[in-house]
Image (cartoon, coloured by chain):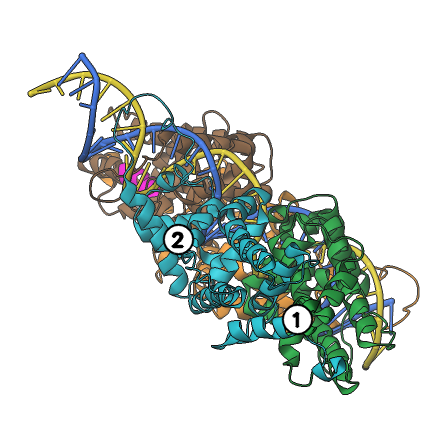
Chain colours: A green, B cyan, C brown, D orange, E yellow, F blue
Amino acid sequence: MSPAGTGPRQGGPARGRPRSEAVERAVVEGVMELLEDGVPLAELSIERIARTVGVGKATIYRRWSGKEELFVDVVRAAEPPDPELPGTSLRDDLVVLLESLRRRGLANRASAILHNVHAQMKSSPRIWAAYHDTVVLPRRRLGLEVLRRGRENGELRADVDMELLNDIIVGPLLVRTVLRPDADLPEGLAEQVVDTLLQGLRPVSRHA
Amino acid sequence: MSPAGTGPRQGGPARGRPRSEAVERAVVEGVMELLEDGVPLAELSIERIARTVGVGKATIYRRWSGKEELFVDVVRAAEPPDPELPGTSLRDDLVVLLESLRRRGLANRASAILHNVHAQMKSSPRIWAAYHDTVVLPRRRLGLEVLRRGRENGELRADVDMELLNDIIVGPLLVRTVLRPDADLPEGLAEQVVDTLLQGLRPVSRHA
Amino acid sequence: MSPAGTGPRQGGPARGRPRSEAVERAVVEGVMELLEDGVPLAELSIERIARTVGVGKATIYRRWSGKEELFVDVVRAAEPPDPELPGTSLRDDLVVLLESLRRRGLANRASAILHNVHAQMKSSPRIWAAYHDTVVLPRRRLGLEVLRRGRENGELRADVDMELLNDIIVGPLLVRTVLRPDADLPEGLAEQVVDTLLQGLRPVSRHA
Amino acid sequence: MSPAGTGPRQGGPARGRPRSEAVERAVVEGVMELLEDGVPLAELSIERIARTVGVGKATIYRRWSGKEELFVDVVRAAEPPDPELPGTSLRDDLVVLLESLRRRGLANRASAILHNVHAQMKSSPRIWAAYHDTVVLPRRRLGLEVLRRGRENGELRADVDMELLNDIIVGPLLVRTVLRPDADLPEGLAEQVVDTLLQGLRPVSRHA
DNA sequence: TCCTAATCGAGACGGTACGTCAGGTCTTCTT
DNA sequence: AAGAAGACCTGACGTACCGTCTCGATTAGGA
């Protein structure tokens, strides 16, 4: 989803003054800076954003239908790119995936309230759907692809539900981000999660 | 955290008309009903709550310092009680714990927006702390206790990080609740998660 | 017409905090002062009035439905009281009436734009009706009463249309106020108008 | 005052696309039609006018500096031409003059809001001056000329103030138009006014 | 039984933000 | 260069809530 103005910018030849692309960037970056400056999310009114960025309110409403829709673009602009998978083994790929999530969690922690923006987006199903489709889903697909290859290579039991497995792997990071925001995401966490899962939980003595 | 009025209800002998406990209940239940009637969270102003419940605004502010603080009590009133643990085995205890989470997830799904209330609470660190301490933490302690007993009984490897393990177990439910609200929480999910984890992910043939 | 809030201030016992009468006065006087300070009428937004008087916009809208309705009260507050009629003769009464109009015209001239406020009121038929009924009509009735008495006393021809005569007497003042705002309203104008009319326009030699 | 654009249409040879004179007419007539269609004056924004007439906003601003300046041309376009004076007698000339005013009043009544446009023009001294100089003043000069001739012919007392007399004659029409918009302007009103004034107000019996 | 004081519903109060609309100015492409 | 179109910043519009503050009317003690 890109800026979502419902105006006549759809078809036909360009008529009238075209929208300035600089404004889009300025607004999104302005919001980001305000958040990083420690402005509480509740004080982020459209009015204030417009004032700070030096832009008319109408110019914002021309592109986004409201605060939430704007936040989608803000959060998306803060998303890191998809990681490069080494492809050497199931373990290595999973570690890289989780490490990417860990780094994102750290970054969001640093930029203060980006978290809450994330939470706020759940206010509207429509907004959440947009975020889900462009951010959550692609990552999930990537993880499932890694798992599928792992099973084909015999690195995973064939009878494990891939969807569930993906949830199990991603889960710990989410728990620490959402439910335990004071918990840290230490270096090596990605390896620890993957290795714990791949080694199994039962005592080794059982196999003797 | 109970109703939080900072008024003169602190020390000394009771003077003047005492606060009606019925009001507390009426307000919390009123909010709950509004949410269940499909009123979007964004339209839940203190003004509207007071109007609907038939209560003065000041009466609400006398008890809660704001919307978020009120929501804490609303969400807490919707929390199910801690489950009874059978204590027969690590697996059985974990299944009961997860099943309790699953049922809560389903209930919240039904009452539509309770989720968002949850998300909204993250706006204020103070509010979130209150919710975390009275709702999240006790459940977490319960889970860690179960795991500790499992390790003492030799049902778990001794070298696994208990904190991490708890996150791994709770994770899938959280992922489906937070990141994939369209995913369902089918019957048997609790067992599936626990068994998948306890059986390990590697192919059994490898150990032959 | 007094402050015209359409709120529930109609029947029943007084409920809730009563409206402060001081606000009414403060707003009306505030507008008056702004006008006297030379603020152009076009810059008199409700927003600015509220800001200047130190009052919430809602407080204004609670009493008046818009700028025009507020202006009615402003103009009315600037109206002088009905003059005391001597009753000694038709001429004396008419002079007093006109002199009152003349003084009002001078006062309005001084307070700069009150004129324009007057003009502005014609934007809405409803508003104008309110002004007409409470300000224009009573004065007109007073004038007609004076004329009626004059006819009964034999000071006027019996076949003259009283309504028309009233218009003839008031007209000159209105012309100078509305069409020739640069014309002055010199002392003695009232006497001059009345005497000119009562003496007739034809040369006296005609009666020889 | 003609269209007032301050653009490069002053001296030198014509360069680029010449201004279309049709636009001037189209805009003025468009406003007139909107008014006659019952559009309230308050809803007559430049924006709407441009949209309705199918013209760019800048095209309007190129010719008029604002709404009021445009209104001057609109009202002037609605002015009837100066009446032809018979010159047979003072009375006949005055009747023709007043009759012309009466007809204009009726026309404006019909086109509803033209009145208000008139009132609105008083917002700006500059605008009002323009209207006054091109519309009000010429008519006034005509009236004074008629009166002057009447005095020279011995049809008027020599000691009457001509300016005042003109105001007296025009006044009744203005009163009914401005202060009593519900009063009608019946046929024969012009004669009635003039004759009433010329016959004098005192009972004839007094001179016996 | 009265008195005192805090409570209750109601709603006015000074503010702030909402989302829309218009004012004038400025691009853009077309004529 | 002027045309229509429409984006741009500014600021007012009228509404809704915010959290606080009066109101008159209960409701419990304690005197």
Q: Along the line of sight, which residue is nearer the eye, C10 or B106?
A: B106
Q: Which residue range is magenta in the image?
A: C134-142
**Amino acid type, mark 1:** Arg
* As drawn, D161 above or below A28: above
SS class, disc 2: helix
- Identify the subunit bearing mark 2: B
Is residue B112 rendered to the left or right of residue A79? left
Inspect the magenta stretch and tell me whether residue D39 lies in it. Answer: no
Q: Are marks 1 and 2 on the same chain?
A: no
Q: Residue D167 location, x and y as percent?
A: 48, 43
- Residue B77's label in the rendered image is 2
What residue lies at 82% left-to-right and 68% top-to-bottom? A96
Residue C16 lies in quadrant: top left
Left or right: where does residue A161 sit relative to residue D182? right
Disc 1 chain ID: A
Q: Which element is circle 1 on?
A: helix
Residue C181, position as x, y percentages in the image: 55, 39
Q: Which residue is mark 1?
A: A206
Q: Residue furthest right?
A: D13
| Residue B9 makes an appearance in the image | yes
Q: How many neighbours does mark 1 have within 10 angstroms: few (below 14), some (14-19), or many (20 or more)?
A: few
Q: CA distance from mark 1 to mark 2?
A: 44 Å
Q: Residues within 10 Å of mark 2 (few under 14, many from 20)?
A: few
| Residue A21 found in image quarter | bottom right
Residue type at the position of mark 2: Ala
Direction front: furthest residue: A208
